[in-house]
Amino acid sequence: MYFVLRPVNDKNAASIRESPKDPTGKWSGRLNAGKPVTGKVPVLQAKTSPDHGDKLLDVVRNSLANLIVTEAFLDALDAAGVRNYQRMPLIVNHHADRKKHDYFMCNVVGLIECLDRKKAKVEWDDDDPGQVFVMTKLAIDAKKVAAHNDSLAEKDRLKLFRLQEAPRFILADDTVRDAVEKAKITGVEFKKPEECGDFK
């Protein structure tokens, strides 16, 4: 079974309004696109917003669907056997305690085309008919995920990936969910696809 992995919507949780700046224009657009970042990325900086909560969690909400996480979260991915991610050090400057906190930008590398087009409620992008513009209700075809993974060597099969038709959605299998929950990672939830969309 596959779940949507996303930050919790907690009014007390800290949130990052803007993602780190990319003066080179080479890497930032790939961080939520399911594609690898090549070349050197500097140590990144981001600020929490005073308009949101103060509590820093293991997974921090942000406006661009980037995965900003602690090392504990990455350790849980490792425990689940996830290998298809890149980690980039990120310093979070917290407005509440005025301190710097060590985080990582986690770039999930891997896309699977597995939208169930009959069950999902979608508006397609006029400029790119293969990309979702708005997802009112998500639905996943697990057979397409299995077919994709069956075509790969066992070590390369994806337990964590982004939806190719709408890469802002990160999908995880139950072994990832179990490892993250066992590690008591805060700030993240695993929702059934049919419970998810751009507005819920």
Image (cartoon, rainbow, N blue to C red):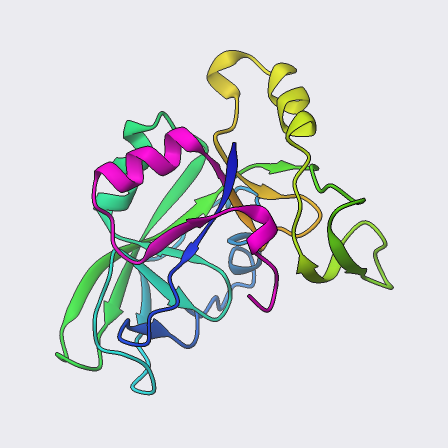
Side of 10 where 101 appears, left or right: left
From this view, report whether residue 199 is shown above or below residue 164: below
Residue at 27 percent across and 36 percent down: it is: 76
**Residue 72, how many percent across, how many down?**
21, 44
| Closest to the observer, 22 or 70 | 70
| Closest to the observer, 32 or 149 | 149
Q: Does the magenta stretch include residue 68?
A: no
Q: Does the magenta stretch include residue 179?
A: yes
Total number of numbered discs in the rendering = 0
From this view, report whether residue 21 is shown above or below residue 145: below
**Residue 192, how many percent across, how many down?**
52, 46
Side of 183 where 197 appears, left or right: right
* Residue 160 shows up from this direction: yes
* Residue 33 shows up from this direction: no
Q: Residue furthest bottom?
A: 51
**Residue 161, how many percent across, how many down?**
53, 38
Q: For residue 79, which quarter of the picture?
A: top left
| Closest to the observer, 65 or 194 | 194
**Residue 23, how many percent across, how many down?**
49, 69
Side of 7 where 144 appears, left or right: right
Q: In which quarter of the image is the C terminus?
A: bottom right
Q: For residue 34, which quarter of the picture?
A: top right
Q: Residue furthest top?
A: 153
| Closest to the observer, 26 or 184 | 184
Report the span colored magenta. Answer: 172-200
From this view, report whether residue 149 is shown above or below residue 172: above
From this view, report whether residue 12 is shown above or below residue 163: below
Residue at 29 percent across and 34 percent down: it is: 179
